[in-house]
Amino acid sequence: MAHDGGERGAGSLLSRMQHGLFVLLTGIGLARALTTGAALAPVLLGVTLLLGWYAAGLALARRTDTNLAIWWLLGLTAVWLGLVLVSSEFVWVAVSLWLLAGHFMRVPWAIAYTIAVLVIVIASQQHGRPWTSAMIMGPAVGALFSLALSLGQHRLVRDGIERQRLVDALMAAQAESETLHAELASAQRESGALAERTRLSRDIHDGLAQSFSSILLTARGAREATPETLARALRQVETSAQEGLDESRRVVSALAPRDLTDTGLTAALHRTLDSLSQSTGIDATLHVDGDVTSLPTTVEVALLRVAQGALANVRQHARAGRVVVTLTGADDSVRLDIVDDGRGFDPSHAPEATPDLALGGYGLRASRERLRDLGGGLDVESRPGDGTALTAYLPLGGVRS
């Protein structure tokens, strides 16, 4: 029968019991028919045909064609009706027919079928005897119970199929979730690698490249220097080279800049300005307002890198005579101002990236990205011939130590 192959658990047990009941009722009908003197040949022929037709339904158990199952049931009913005409002892096989009706027919049609079979059962008991309530109530109760049991079994099978479908959908969703998780993990790894490359490029630009730039400028300026100034230039080159070497080791180890590791941001800014003054003669001054002694390391690194980039721009391009750096700390933020009296530039026409290390090129963009990653920002005010003012700011919030 159509649902037998797919039933599991309790539904499968009920189906086996239903098959056994059909064979049992057919056997009882056969035995009673033979003991009541029914014609042997028609009875045996009818029973053989009935069981064979039922077995054919078992062979079609995995078929899902509902119309085919209904026609099979109607054929089984026709064979049963022929047996009832031969001997009324086969009327109780109707119990199995009622059980089958709930499987293959919609509820309205199953009810109509059950009533039709019930009328046949009741009519086969009359045989000229007066009607009694037992002749009607007994079969009616049996029909009602069988149909209800059939519908309940069908519902059980259907719920099992639905649960299996939900389990399959859940397994598919879990597999899809694992795939998405793997893709997300891969994307996060790629994002982390990109962020690390970006961080290293910034550190190289703001630290190592500035040391190389200082060495280059000092070497160019010493081409026509006197022996006294040449010795001073060589000392400056040696100092810058040592700083670059130390900085490269810090970058490779992914640690904070050497100046910060040793003494903190304020002292690091002092040394950077002293180096600028010694190598260029620019008057460089640092002002500190507020408490900046307990800034988070990430904030100190970001501000120092911005200062190094800005002062490299002053060294190479500004032609300034004076630069003032102001570090201001507040409860919830910190600000770094760098103002020079150099030749200035037009920020709106600053290139996105230039071959040199000007702040108007890669340095400006890198500084902005560095600060934006920490929730801050960078403002630049400048006009050709009127100097440059740069302001970097970062929020502290809950990260202040």
Image (cartoon, grey):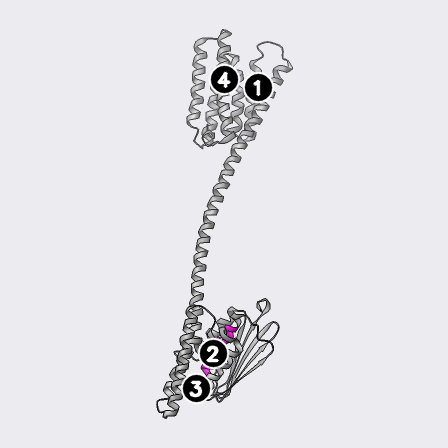
Nearer the observer, disc 2 or disc 1?
A: 2
Q: Residue at x 46, y 49 (%)?
A: 176
Which numbered marker is on residue 72? none
Which numbered marker is on residue 279? 3
Image: magenta residue range: 300-317
**Could you tell me which secondary element the residue under label 1 belongs to?**
helix
Whole-percent x and y of residue 58? 44, 25
> Crowdedness of circle 4 by 10 Å Cα count: few (<14), some, many (20+)?
few
Nearer the observer, disc 1 or disc 4?
A: 4
**Could you tell me which secondary element the residue under label 2 belongs to?**
helix
Q: Quadrant of residue 396?
A: bottom right
Q: Are marks 1 and 4 in contact (CB under 8 Å)?
A: no
**Could you tell me which secondary element the residue under label 4 belongs to?**
helix
Sequence-wise, which precedes: disc 2 or disc 1? 1
Residue 104 vs 295, above or below: the answer is above
Q: In the image as oriented, which residue stretches furthest toward the bottom?
A: 226
Sequence-wise, which precedes: disc 1 or disc 4? 4
In this figure, which residue is indicated by the disc labeled 1?
A: 119
